[in-house]
Amino acid sequence: MESLIKEKIAKLIDVKSIITVILTVLFCLLAWRGIIDGNAVNTIFTTVIAFYFGTQYQKTNNEKEENSNAGTREDITNSK
């Protein structure tokens, strides 16, 4: 259980996550101070979050595909 928690925390502290959090805070501060429009923050934030979750989704799909292909290759190798 403890190693699972450490693993989850380690995944949160990767470069993409840190950049996402920093950008979110930065643009919220800029909008709060009135330096940029709230609609610009919405557009930027949506783009950053979509990119972040899109890459996570793709990474998960690639890992699943690799795992399913590895099982297929073992079955073919073992049947020969």
Image (cartoon, rainbow, N blue to C red):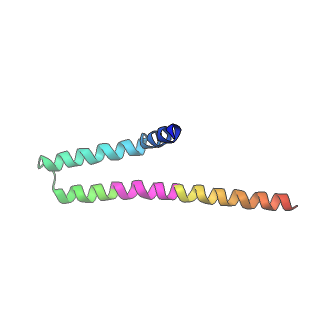
Q: Residue sitting at 28 percent across and 48 percent down?
A: 24
Magenta stretch secondary structure, dominant: helix
Q: Residue sitting at 15 percent across and 56 percent down?
A: 37
Where is residue 42 shown, x and y percent of the image? 24, 58
* Numbered disc total: 0
Residue situated furthest right in the rendering: 80
76 in the magenta segment: no
Magenta range: 48-59
User: Is 16 placed above or below 52 here?
Assistant: above
Q: Residue sitting at 48 percent across and 58 percent down?
A: 57
Q: In screen coordinates, is 78 left or right of 39?
A: right
Where is residue 77 shown, x and y percent of the image? 82, 58
Where is residue 1 shown, x and y percent of the image? 51, 41
Q: In screen coordinates, is 62 left or right of 74?
A: left
- Quadrant that contains the C terminus: bottom right
Q: In screen coordinates, is 5 left or right of 48?
A: right
User: Is 19 placed above or below 59 here?
Assistant: above
Q: Residue sitting at 25 percent across and 45 percent down?
A: 25
Residue situated furthest left in the rendering: 34
Where is residue 69 shown, x and y percent of the image? 69, 60
